[in-house]
Amino acid sequence: MRRTYLILSIILGFLSQGCFQDYTVEERIVVSGRLIASAQKQDVAFSFDNVSTFPVLKSRVSAWTTTNPKIEVSEFQRLPILAVPGSHFEMWGVSATNQISFGKFQAAQGELVSFVNGVTGPSKCETTPTGKICTFTKTDPSSPIFSDLDRIQITIESSGDGDLVQNGSIVLSGFIINQNPGDVEALSFPVSFSQNNITATAALTLRADDAQDGLVELNLTGFPFLDNKFAFQLWSADFVNGFVSCGIFNVQNGVIVDVDTNQPKGSNLFACGVDLGKRSSMVISLEPTFSGNSSGIFDFRPYSASYTPFDADATVKPVAQNVRVSVAGRARDRTLTDVQGKFTVLAGGVGDTYLVIRGLEFQPEFRPIRVIQGSNIGGQNINLVPKPKGEALFHFFERDFAAPVTSVNVSGSFALFPLSLNDSGVNGDAIAGDRVWSVLSKGVSAGTITYNYQINGKTNLNDPHAEKLGSGSSRPTMLIK
């Protein structure tokens, strides 16, 4: 009997200490998928040139509501070259409902010259004590007088245009500020590429095998809709062999659309018809769409991008075997892919996190996932690209650190260390504010480097997702191609 009481006492003692907690099994969520090896890839941002691309014209009006109104041009810069013989500019006074032609003209040798019935005439400009003034009057002196004409516009009209109706592409526009004394804002291209002080951006993605077939992916943010008879056109630019068109398009509500129908293009993939892997530049131009326009590239080329031609081995796809897949915030939840690139990892915890992919041959990659207890995650097919030569890309996941993160540095064994990571969408960071800190370093010598992170300026942390994990006091390593 005493022995029985002793056993019961021991059991009750364990229960009072919560011993069952040690035997609680956390539910693990199955996350599965496949890593797919791709050829080399380049993501390149376009640069925007608003200064030297577009023309500027300064003017004023006089006697605007009389029978002989005038438009007086005092300065003009960078008017585009019109490649089609017979095409010309036309000056207009317009309102929402009315338009009056103030003459057809061309730009030649620093002068604005009249263009009547397809023939170049005398200059419209003369030198005055205050400088050169080019004067435009109504093409039809008998045309009615409209008091509501509130802006000046210049169009590009096609060869053979003989009417007084605005049919062409609007290249410059500006509002009349005050009819008396005749102030007019500087005429400029009528569509803005900046909204709320944010300039529209463009980027291209080139995959070596697709590029070889002439294919390029175009990604646009904040692009305007061109409603002035202009359209965007993507070009492969080779300053030895010239420009090759990859397609014409417009953008509406952030979607690339067909120029004629305004219907979605269905893809941001463009076909250029030449081996882009051997070229090195792309340009987005603005093209007039009036009938009879040239098929060549127009002078308005606000976006340009340069990239590195692909090497001969750029289309080689490494085998996605023995690539480490782990879970941010739960770095011990990890596995290696099999010979087919397939993986299955058991994830603990719940909430939004990332699958982190690291391999010796591949550029670091990650994929957002949402872990929900009782719900497995499958079908995670992730494309991997080979590491570019001389690049080191680092990612740090806030989920791997227990406290708020205010700064992240990486230091280690190569000359460019230390580096500051950011979560601002620049310098290797793909998405601002996603709690993934990143930095991309180029020009790194080939070989194996060691590294670790310093969090908030004081806490050193080894990368728990590294290609090759450190042990003890040793740092993790990264292979540079």
Image (spheres, helix red, strand yellow):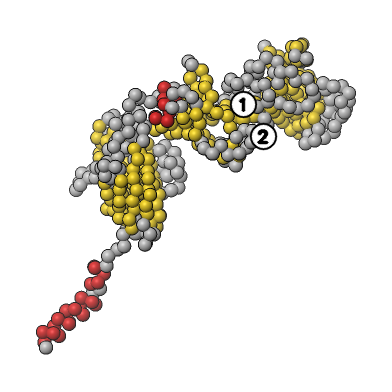
Q: Would residue 131 be visible to someone looking at this image?
A: no
- The reply, left or right, for residue 222 in relation to residue 343 is right
Quadrant containing the N terminus is: bottom left
Give me the residue at 58% from left, 21% from top. 297
Q: Which residue is mark 1?
A: 287
The amino acid sitting under disc 2 is Asp
The amino acid sitting under disc 1 is Glu
* Residue nearer the viewer, 281 or 417: 281
Q: Position of residue 461 (x, y in %)?
A: 28, 48
Residue 23: name its quadrant.
bottom left
Quadrant containing the C terminus is: top left
Q: Is residue 177 above or below residue 158?
A: below
Alpha-carbon neighbours of circle 2 within 10 Å: few (<14), some, or many (≥20)? few
Q: Is residue 414 above or below residue 116?
A: below
Residue 4: name its quadrant.
bottom left
Give me the residue at 30% from left, 35% from top. 318
Identify the element where label 1 is drawn: strand
- The reply, left or right, for residue 174 in relation to residue 192 is right
Q: Position of residue 395 (x, y in %)?
A: 35, 43
Identify the element where label 2 is drawn: loop
Residue 422: name its quadrant.
top left
Q: CA distance from mark 1 to mark 2?
A: 12 Å
Q: Is residue 354 above or below residue 421?
A: below
Q: Position of residue 210 (x, y in %)?
A: 42, 30
Mark 1 or mark 2: name the one nearer the start of the chain: 2
- The reply, left or right, for residue 163 in relation to residue 325 is right
Give me the residue at 36% from left, 57% from top. 376
**Mark seen at residue 227:** 2
